[in-house]
Amino acid sequence: MCPTTRKRVVTRQDNKATNKSTAKGATASKRKVEDSEEEEYESDEYGNGSSEEEDNKTTKRRKVAAKPAATATKTKAKRALKKKNGEDNTPLAARTAVTSLKKAMYIGAHVSAAGGVQNSIQNALHIGANAFALFLKSQRKWNNPPLAADVAKQYRQLASSNSYDSTLHVLPHGSYLVNLAQTDADKAAQAYTSFVDDLKRCDELGIRLYNFHPGNCLGGDKAEACARIAERLNKAHAETKQVVTVLENMAGGGNVVGGRFEELRDIIEGVKDKKRVAVCLDTCHAFAAGYDLRTPEAYKKTMEEFDEVVGLKYLKAFHINDSKAPLGSNRDLHANIGTGFLGLGAFHNLVNDETFAGTPMILETPIERKGPDGKTFEDKQVWADEIKLLEWLVGADRESEEFKEKEAKLWKQGEGERAKLQDQVDRKAAKDAKKGVKKGKGRGRKKVKEETDDDESE
């Protein structure tokens, strides 16, 4: 779910008092950083202000002894990889002028904010994005220092100078920790505080749209959960200036709120200021929840249903993802464009829908790839290429040979993954059906026994 979550693992040596003599030498050199951005991540990569205690921790983390020759070679390889990914400021793709497209589609991806939120601008430029998403603070922890004033100023200046409209085409993603449907008083307060903090950061940065997952009813009633979410949105709106809280539809299943359009409708109905609530439609989530988008007819039917239940006027953003899992599977598994069960045609339907011209469309597709050394890295070229592919789809003839060739090639690439997921879904369905039959037979025997008992009593 959501944008692609970066997996960063850091192995640190135990610097106990008994090991101080070795910690400065060989032990320190063994500190392994699996991700090239990890040091920035650990040292407050979002450009927040920091306390003296945090500064001391950061300094301690960076006291690493001189690296041996082998480590220096690895460092050189990482630098080469960073260059390949455009992290040395080399653009991976030219940014397309939206005016050159047949329809004004603003397409981008969820980019890194490592080193400060202002760096998200450069990272968006690297992949040729005309829209982008980012995390405004660490989405892995509850407490974050406030946004530094100079960082907010830099962000605004860079957004303006590079023609990114923060009121329309920038879509921050909320923390996965936050659950506005929470029933526990203390946990609810913690979630709400973190949520409002993000909204205030949006106000500081001049960002108008803020995307978040509705929440989890934790086994309770979903209608009551929707009411709690709406109540907390009303409170949050009163504490902030202009930011629009954008509900994301979910893959459905279990206790997750937002899998059905009706649940999004119920939340919106409870929000007092309707101008400050909207919806972001995730294509993978919608498909997993049972809403088909593959053919022009299916796409039209789904959008008509959304309009009837929620209202298209509330649809202000999209997360553009294919689905590794089949229709109605309730599996939140993002696939690269055209390689999943949605297929290339679904995205052709979307980017050619005049209704959504000017709407931010954000890729959250997988970019993890294995390098020559067998280690996983993030290949930003994937997003650069997918942006160009989606832009090519604008105005493309679906019946042309070029379209059919691209469609077939991408479909072939995802063949193995689709087969694996289809098998999983089929086996689960068979298992559930078997359980249902056994349960039904059990109820049948119980009913027969009850009827026999009744006969005997009579």
Image (cartoon, helix red, strand yellow):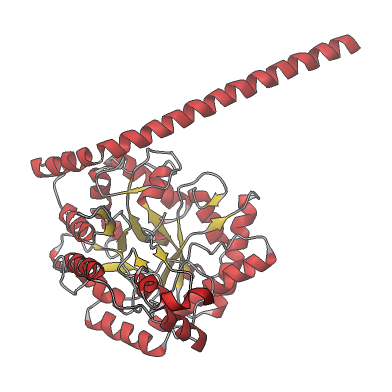
Task: Let me know if residue 353 appears in the view.
Answer: no
- Based on the displayed image, in which of its 4 quarters is residue 230 positioned? bottom right
Q: Which of 207/378 is in front? A: 378
Residue depicted at x 16% and y 59%: 102
Q: Which of 189/366 is in front? A: 366
Q: Residue furthest left?
A: 401
Q: Is residue 194 above or below residue 182?
A: below
Q: Residue furthest right?
A: 457
Quadrant for the N terminus in the image: bottom left
Where does the image place residue 241, in percent across and percent down from the top left? 48, 81
In the image, taking residue 437 as reference, residue 300 lies left or right, namely left
Quadrant for the C terminus in the image: top right
Q: Which of 81/218 is in front? A: 81
- Based on the displayed image, in which of its 4 quarters is residue 239 positioned? bottom right
Residue depicted at x 27% and y 36%: 416
Q: Is residue 53 above or below residue 358?
A: below
In the image, taking residue 450 as reference, residue 50 lies left or right, namely left
Where does the image place residue 95, in percent across and percent down from the top left? 16, 68
Task: Let me know if residue 139 appears in the view.
Answer: yes
* Count of numbered marks: 0
In the image, taking residue 175 as reference, residue 171 lies left or right, namely left
Where does the image place residue 69, in percent across and percent down from the top left? 22, 70
Where does the image place residue 275, in percent across and percent down from the top left? 47, 70
Q: Is residue 63 above or below residue 403?
A: below
Residue depicted at x 28% and y 68%: 131
- Based on the displayed image, in which of its 4 quarters is residue 3 positioned? bottom left
Residue depicted at x 34% and y 88%: 153
